[in-house]
Image: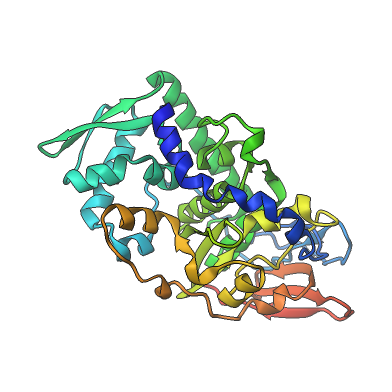
């Protein structure tokens, strides 16, 4: 386990420098209001008060029944990964492995050696099935069957894995609803993570799976940039929104999340949006759905940034990929980034309400429902 963990740390420590940017981001945070999200089925009369502590999210959509609760999805999927290098049979092999791990089996059907290497690598499991990262490893492949090795007591692992599923399910149902649009899921999970998570640099932690990993971040709500980026991406994948960690190592040495919405790419930075860094602990919209140019203005070397999971495997297979395909140029949400006070989100009319800094009138930005 220690050896595998060290390999994972080599991959993620490149982004641990995000702590150095904390003072820089403080000057960019905006005064906004804390968000209280109500489910879409609620139809009681509600008003939005512009206070410094709370904003009610208006939802007047009438429904005949409550939306179904969100269930844990062990088989998350990324179209970006498929477009770049993950074959259909690789996904099937990964899902076979996950199903085997969830029931404590020691082997699974696997299409080939390359699929076996991808499925069992700690970098893959860290992003696509976090509880297995470093705790379940590959133990050989032969004749279409891959073997597994548990690096801790199997029964104890199964308890940890079940607790993980329960916690992810709880988080998702607290943050979003199954009838939310993709934008509302992106917004709701950003709001949740920036409110619940606390920045803790690795130097303050012991370098173990339980304290430094996507799994640890999701379970403890503590972490650094690369963990927040991976955790946010994983939660979005859980609810069907394509998202992957992205990072650059030349200027800020920082990681955040690349998100696909309505056929467009955007940047979301949970780390810099954390409420603990906001002057009044309020929601900061500046780092939600940014463009490349806005990230560059933040100090990021976006032209040389990479989708971490894609870049890692392309390097292993000596394969080049065209990062220029993953640009963020749509300016739909730019008005929210110009020092605004968030006033609420009206999900019935697909509108975000805000007041521009130095203004007094409420504005709205309409988003498309997908």
Where is residue 66? Give x, y as percent.
58, 55
User: Which residue is found at the position 76% from the left and 56% from the top?
Assistant: 23
Where is residue 329? Give x, y as percent.
53, 80
Residue furthest toward the left?
143
Q: Is residue 360 left or right of residue 290?
A: right
User: Which residue is found at the position 50% from the left and 32% from the top?
Assistant: 209
User: Which residue is found at the position 66% from the left and 68% from the top?
Assistant: 298
Q: Is residue 171 above or below residue 324?
A: above
Where is residue 325? Give x, y as percent.
40, 74
Q: How many marks?
A: 0
Q: Is residue 340 left or right of residue 219?
A: right
Q: Considering depth in this image, is 59 or 331 the residue closer to the camera?
A: 331
Q: Is residue 242 visible?
A: no
Q: Considering depth in this image, is 299 or 295 the residue closer to the camera?
A: 299
Q: Considering depth in this image, is 166 or 357 the residue closer to the camera?
A: 357
Q: Is residue 126 above or below residue 320?
A: above
User: Which residue is found at the position 21% from the left and 48% from the top?
Assistant: 114
User: Residue 140 lies in what quarter of the image?
Assistant: top left
Q: Is residue 301 visible?
A: yes
Q: Quadrant of the N terminus?
A: top left
Q: Is residue 109 left or right of residue 151?
A: left
Where is residue 106? Give x, y as percent.
26, 27
Q: Is residue 355 left or right of residue 131?
A: right
């Amino acid at each position: 386990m220690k050896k595998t963990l060290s390999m994972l740390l080599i991959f993620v420590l490149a982004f641990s420098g995000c702590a150095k940017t904390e003072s820089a981001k403080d000057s960019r945070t905006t005064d906004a209001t804390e968000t209280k999200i109500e489910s879409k089925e609620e139809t009681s009369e509600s008003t939005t008060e512009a206070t410094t502590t709370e904003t009610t999210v208006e939802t007047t959509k009438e429904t005949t029944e409550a939306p179904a609760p969100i269930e844990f999805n062990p088989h998350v999927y990324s179209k970006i990964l498929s477009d770049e290098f993950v074959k259909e049979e690789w996904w099937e092999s990964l899902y076979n492995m996950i199903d085997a791990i969830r029931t404590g089996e020691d082997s699974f059907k696997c299409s080939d050696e390359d699929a076996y290497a991808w499925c069992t690598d700690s970098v893959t499991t860290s992003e696509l099935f976090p509880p297995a990262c470093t705790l379940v490893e590959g133990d050989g492949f032969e004749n279409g069957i891959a073997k597994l090795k548990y690096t801790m007591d199997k029964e104890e692992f199964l308890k940890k894995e079940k607790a993980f599923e329960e916690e992810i399910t709880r988080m998702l149902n607290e943050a979003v609803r199954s009838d939310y649009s993709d934008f509302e899921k992106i917004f709701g999970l950003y709001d949740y993570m920036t409110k619940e998570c606390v920045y803790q640099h690795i130097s303050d932690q012991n370098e173990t799976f339980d304290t430094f990993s996507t799994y640890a971040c999701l379970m403890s709500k503590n972490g650094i940039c690369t963990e927040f980026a991976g955790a946010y991406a994983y939660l979005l994948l859980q609810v069907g929104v394509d998202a992957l960690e992205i990072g650059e190592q030349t200027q800020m040495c920082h990681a955040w999340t690349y998100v696909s919405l309505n056929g467009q790419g955007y940047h979301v930075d949970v780390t810099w949006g954390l409420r603990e860094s906001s002057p009044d602990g309020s929601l900061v919209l500046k780092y939600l759905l940014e463009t490349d140019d806005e990230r560059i203005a933040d100090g990021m070397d976006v032209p040389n940034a990479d989708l971490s999971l894609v870049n890692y495997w392309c390097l292993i297979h000596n394969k080049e990929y065209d990062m220029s395909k993953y640009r963020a140029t749509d300016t739909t949400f730019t008005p929210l980034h110009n020092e605004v006070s968030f006033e609420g989100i009206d999900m019935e009319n697909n509108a975000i309400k805000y007041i521009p800094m130095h203004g007094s009138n409420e504005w709205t930005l309409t988003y498309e429902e997908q």
